Amino acid sequence: MCARPRAASLATETSSTLAGVQGERPILIAYDGSEPARAAVREAGALFAPARALVLTVWEPGLSQVMLTPDPLGMGGTMMPYNPDVARDVERASEEHAQQIAQDGARLAREVDLDSQAITAEDNLTPQDAIVAAAEEHEARAIVIGSRGLRGLKSKLLGSTSAHVLHHALCPVVVVRHPDDHNAQA
């Protein structure tokens, strides 16, 4: 699990000459295709190449259960009648879209000399929890995640994925700050 390295493997984990060895625990890069996520992949390459990397995209199952159609009066939406075929197609499309995003991130990771693999995870609770759970499941030695640079009310309403991961992961977390973080005022 995403835990502290075992004492017997500590020297192996920290040896730069062994980076990229097949048996090495991977780093996990949270990737949603956004510019902050792309920056996180580039920074992961700068810090960890040629390490193994899992590029994770989280997707939300069950979206087909809450599909809305526009209200003819423009006052919101109404629930579409449930159709199992449509629901199955929406689920499949959501998962395939997540796989495409993860593959894009893995391609970008290979460009910065990481030995990368695209993976996806279902968001059964929150994206943050899915990231932490995937890191534990794959015994990641570190998580790399971008920061969107949300401030003020937006940050309070939307929450911070990177802050949640930072506080809940059992392994080290590298948060790559959004360029606007350097210029934004609190």
Image (spheres, helix red, strand yellow):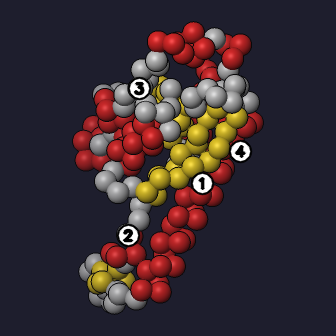
Tell me the residue at 65%/44% (across/down): 117
Residue 153, percent from left and from top: 25, 42
**Residue holding disc 2:** 62
* Viewport quadrant of the C terminus: top left
- Asked which secondary structure carries label 1, the reply is helix
Q: Residues within 10 Å of mark 4 (few under 14, many from 20)?
A: some
Labelled disc at residue 3: 3
- Distance between the Cα atoms at labels 1 and 4? 10 Å
Q: Is residue 62 above or below residue 102?
A: below
- Asked which secondary structure carries label 3, the reply is loop
Badge 1 vs badge 4, beta-carbon distance below 8 Å: no
Tell me the residue at 30%/83% (across/down): 79
- Distance between the Cα atoms at labels 1 and 3? 27 Å
Tell me the residue at 33%/51% (across/down): 126
Locate residue 143 relative to residue 53 in the image: left or right: left
Q: Which of the marked residues, 1 or 4, is nearer the chain's N terminus? A: 1
Tell me the residue at 69%/25% (across/down): 21
**Residue holding disc 1:** 101
Q: Is residue 113 above or below residue 132?
A: above
- Mark 2 is on which residue type? Gly
- Mark 1 is on which residue type? Ile
The answer to whether residue 90 is visible is yes
Q: Is residue 58 above or below residue 37?
A: below
Of 181 and 127, nearer the camera is 127
Residue 26, percent from left and from top: 58, 31
Badge 3 vs badge 2, beta-carbon distance below 8 Å: no
Hey, which quadrant is residue 159 in on the image?
A: top left
**Residue holding disc 4:** 107
Q: Which of the marked residues, 3 or 2, is nearer the chain's N terminus? A: 3
Q: Which of the marked residues, 1 or 3, is nearer the chain's N terminus? A: 3
Q: Residues within 10 Å of mark 1 (few under 14, many from 20)?
A: many
